[in-house]
Image (cartoon, rainbow, N blue to C red):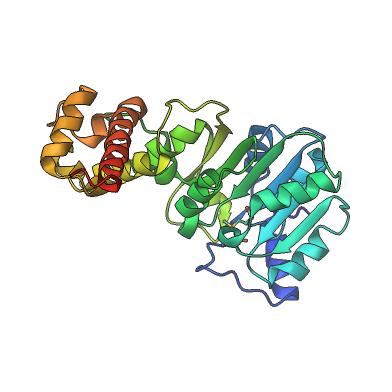
């Protein structure tokens, strides 16, 4: 009996008196080809460390452990811990951590595993993400500067479309710019909703993110860059002149000067700007904020 088969899942639920939790986004994979696509897409080598987000009953965990030197899986639901101990008992290269991924320091896990000598290769993050926190998980991984080489995760198709979108597209938004700033994004496979238990309302897709060694734009301040993106897309129907007014406390007149200095038509909308154009605006704002700060410090208003 395979771990991913609906009858195994039923059996485990009965024996462990386990109820699938909707609020924890528990939609388990029941299809071998989807598991294989994620594992293949993750490019796991035999010396690698795999960190899995939300192992559930361990279908991806077991498949990853067949390929990797070590797998560390972070699962929030403590009721799944005894189940994972049972389903993964034949593997000696898996460690399960009962914790919230959003409160887990991934770099600490990586450091700990490296110090313990459990792997010498790359760090691969994988997972079939709980849908209710897909975006926070992805942004946490990238914003925290995690020292991983790649991230291969399944998410709702709509979120994957937004992440992959480019300027001018209806689905292009703050998450597209933010994620594409940190990494190269490739779609691995589309996954129909029928392969999950329970069946979610929407289809899914697997994306493979390769973390960039060199960013696509040199930034003077990441904080101001992200503030510009948030403000721009927060009021996406407004022109840049209007949507950026208020960023770093700057008034309309200052934003108008900044856009002109950046060579950006103030009547454009955020959805037409590429990463470099956002970076250009953010860098001029950063210089202006620094200048204003200096002038204020010296009492020269
Ligand atoms: N990997 C399994 C599979 O593909 O069949 C389960 C995937 S299921 C979509 C998401 C998993 O993430 C569940 O096991 C759920 O309990 C777990 N989870 C939900 N929120 C979490 C969090 N904040 N931190 C860690 N795990 C979480």
Q: Residue at (52%, 52%) from the top-left corner?
A: 137
The picture quadrant for ligand 1 comes to bottom right
Q: Is residue 161 visible?
A: no
Q: Nearer the viewer, residue 156 or 98?
A: 98
Q: Residue furthest bottom?
A: 17
Q: Quadrant of the C terminus?
A: top left
Quadrant position of residue 224: top left
Q: Quadrant of the N terminus?
A: bottom right
Q: Position of residue 88 (x, y in %)?
A: 81, 57
Q: Nearer the viewer, residue 209 or 21?
A: 209
Q: Residue at (65%, 34%) from the top-left corner?
A: 149
Q: Residue at (20%, 45%) from the top-left corner?
A: 250
Quadrant position of residue 6: bottom right
Q: Nearer the viewer, residue 266 or 150?
A: 266
Q: Position of residue 191 (x, y in %)?
A: 52, 42
Q: Is residue 257 visible?
A: yes
The answer to whether residue 169 is left or right of residue 18 is left
Q: Position of residue 150 (x, y in %)?
A: 62, 36
Q: Residue at (51%, 32%) from the top-left corner?
A: 183
Q: Position of residue 210 (x, y in %)?
A: 58, 31
From this view, report whether residue 295 is shown above or below residue 29. above
Q: Residue furthest top?
A: 263
From this view, report whether residue 55 is shown above or below residue 44. below
Q: Nearer the viewer, residue 77 or 98?
A: 98
């Amino acid at each position: 009996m395979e771990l991913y088969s609906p009858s195994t899942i039923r059996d485990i639920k009965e024996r462990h008196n386990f109820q699938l939790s909707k609020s924890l986004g528990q939609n388990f994979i029941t299809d071998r080809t989807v598991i294989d696509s994620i594992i293949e897409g993750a490019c796991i080598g035999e010396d690698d460390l795999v960190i899995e987000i939300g192992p559930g009953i361990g279908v991806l965990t077991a498949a990853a452990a067949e390929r990797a030197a070590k797998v560390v899986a972070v699962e929030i639901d403590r009721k799944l811990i005894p189940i994972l101990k049972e389903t993964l008992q034949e593997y000696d290269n898996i460690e399960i951590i009962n914790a919230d991924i959003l409160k887990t320091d991934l770099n600490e896990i990586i450091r700990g595993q490296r110090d313990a000598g459990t792997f010498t290769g790359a760090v691969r993050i994988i997972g079939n993400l709980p849908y209710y926190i897909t975006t926070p998980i992805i942004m946490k991984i990238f914003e925290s500067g995690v020292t991983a080489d790649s991230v291969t995760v399944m998410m709702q198709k709509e979120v994957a479309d937004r992440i992959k979108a480019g300027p001018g597209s209806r689905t292009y938004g703050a998450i597209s710019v933010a994620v594409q700033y940190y990494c190269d994004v490739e779609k691995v496979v589309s996954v129909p909703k029928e392969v999950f238990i329970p069946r979610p309302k929407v289809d899914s897709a697997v994306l493979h993110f390769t973390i960039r060694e060199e960013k696509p734009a040199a930034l003077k301040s990441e904080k101001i860059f992200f503030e510009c993106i948030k403000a721009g897309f927060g009021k996406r129907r407004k022109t840049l002149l209007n949507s950026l007014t208020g960023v770093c406390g700057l008034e309309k007149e200052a934003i108008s000067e900044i856009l002109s200095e950046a060579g950006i038509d103030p009547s454009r909308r955020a959805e037409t700007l590429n990463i470099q154009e956002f970076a250009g605006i953010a860098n001029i704002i950063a210089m202006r904020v620094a200048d204003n700060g200096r002038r204020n410090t010296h009492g020269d208003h």
